Image: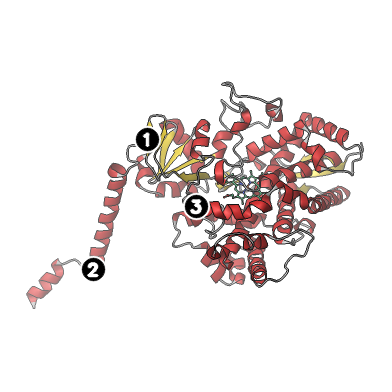
Amino acid sequence: MDSVNNTNRILPSVPVLCVAAYAFYLVGRVFYRLYLHPLARFPGPRTAAATSWYEAYFEIVLTGQYSKQISRLHDQYGPIVRVTPHELHIRDPRFFDEVYGKNLHLDKEGWDKRFGCAGGVLTTVKGEHHKRRRAALLPMFSRRSILDFIHIIYRHIDTLSLRMQEFEARKEPLNLSLAFPALTGDIIMDYFFGFNYAQLKHPEFESFHDAFIKIAGTGHIATQFPSFYPHRQIMNSIPDKITVWLQPAAKPLLKFKRDQWELIGRTLRGEEVKHNDAKKVIFQEILSSKLPPEDKSHQRLADEAQIVLGGGVETTAFALSIATFHIINTPRIYERLHKDLVEAFPNRASLELSPLEHMPYLKAIIMESARLSYGLSARNPRSHKTMIRYKDWVIPANTCISMTIPEVSHDESIFPNSRDFIPERWLDNPHTADGIPLDRFMVSFGRGTRSCLGITLAWTELYLTLGMIFRRFKFELYEADVTDVELGHDFFIPVARLDSKGVRVFVTSTSD
Ligand code: HEM
């Protein structure tokens, strides 16, 4: 009996064995990553090579600050840095077109875990799946298709104009950072889904804006803990009332998801779903395409709906906020733009796309707004099927390589005084000091086969909105400064400092 007891005392218990085995595994994994991994010889901090907790600290604890830290790492280690155990980051605008190759259908690892809609075109991992899904959407994003719908865009811009007059009459500041997502949200809803939520008419411009910012912020947690934080399950299995109680900002997005789910069901049953005079909704477009049945499932269509909404609302709205802030804050820019607009539209009530598209200064303003709004602040990953060379480095095939748009926009050798809003830098076919056309470094819509699908719609909205507001109104900033439109946090999309109240302005109608 005693000898049995002695043996029990010597043998470790099962939990202790498990802990020891796990500790052994962790140590082994760190050893592998540091010394045996194909990326082991690439420069970068050892902690980032050993564990993704390094990234997690900057993204989760410091709320979206890893991009800034990566810039500091490049200052220290050079243009190529191992930023996580499995990812290399390159800071070199001249290498952008190599990473995001024109004719290559590359894989994109990681974004599928971020939002809980892995079946959307933006988040699809495999290059070949992405290719066919994107092809199915292309007709709806064409210029022809947008011009067919332009009367609806005019309608929303007129609503914005009326709302501006209302704030002028009440002598109250108008919050453009809230009004713009309401505008872009109504346009996207009408264009792709056949109805809108009239967010622009809501007294406080209640829109998807807050929900997107809050949910985008949690993407860092989802990236680190995909199995503990399955967005789709969370959004779909917890009763909506509880989700709204946990996160009140999610309410409009939940309504959108519920409505879309029902709309897709009706489309699948062949019912008419449009409430407006647009030609078709995105689900009809996908269902009539050559995609295989698995790409036409209810869930896949819902994922696509979320991506299209997410892609189009905040990006364009942020570019509009940046443009308006700087135009109002810089009298030289306002005067020149307003003068051009008065010449093109002597009648202040008229507005038309074509003359706006022929205004070099307005185009330069939009280029500058796109440059400073970045589209995405996140690292944008790609994996090449073959090895690629960067300077003296040979990057193994299938390595996740990323670059970041803000780093291109702020390369001082390409865009001197890069933090300043200088539309003039885009005038008269400019080139860099070493003779490369400057617009090659306009990467805010991405590059290659996975670049922005909505670019034509975005430009149309930017032309018409800026044309309307700076022809018909003048503004005075109310307690707003540049930090209200500068990148404070990388939540995948760029977000200003979290206590920003937005770009608020007093509005006055122009009389000329
Ligand atoms: C100023 C406005 C906009 C900017 C700067 C912008 C920027 C971007 C960027 C950087 C990407 C990612 C490209 C990549 O992964 O390499 C993207 C993708 C995408 N954008 Fe935009 N975007 C804007 C407006 C819009 C609009 C209005 C829509 C309309 C719904 C839209 C729809 C999309 C879609 C569907 C994708 C995914 C494309 C794909 O994966 O093939 N975007 N956009």
* Vertical position of residue 87 compared to residue 240: above or below: above
Residue at the spot x=68%, y=27% of the render?
Answer: 425
**Three-letter code for the amino acid on which mark 2 is drawn:** Val
Label 2 within 8 A of ligand 1 by Cβ: no
Q: Is mark 1 on a helix, strand or loop?
A: strand
Query: Label 2 neighbourhood size at 10 Å, few (<14), some (14-19), many (20+)?
Result: few
User: Left or right of 264: which side holds 103?
Assistant: left
User: Left or right of 390: which side holds 310?
Assistant: right
Report the mark closest to the observer, 3 or 1: 3
Residue at the spot x=72%, y=56% of the render?
Answer: 191
Give the Cα distance between marks 2 and 1: 45 Å
Give the Cα distance between marks 3 and 1: 25 Å
Q: Where is residue 278 in the image (x, y as percent from the top left)?
A: 76, 58
Q: Where is residue 140 in the image (x, y as percent from the top left)?
A: 68, 53
Report the mark closest to the observer, 3 or 2: 3
**Three-letter code for the amino acid on which mark 1 is drawn:** Val
Find disc 1 in the rendering and name its residue. 394
Q: Reading the chain from its start, which is encountered first: label 2 or label 1?
A: 2
* Vertical position of residue 343 compared to residue 379: above or below: above
Q: Reading the chain from its start, which is encountered first: label 3 or label 2?
A: 2
Front residue of 261/282: it is 282
Q: Where is residue 478 in the image (x, y as percent from the top left)?
A: 76, 42
Label 3 within 8 A of ligand 1 by Cβ: no
Report the mark closest to the observer, 2 or 1: 1
Query: Label 1 neighbourhood size at 10 Å, few (<14), some (14-19), many (20+)?
Result: few
Find disc 2 in the rendering and name its residue. 14
Query: Label 3 neighbourhood size at 10 Å, few (<14), some (14-19), many (20+)?
Result: few
Look at the numbered discs 2 and 1 and tell me whether their residues touch, using CB distance below 8 Å.
no
**Three-letter code for the amino acid on which mark 3 is drawn:** Glu
Front residue of 397/292: it is 292
Find disc 3 in the rendering and name its residue. 128
For the N terminus, give its image quadrant. bottom left
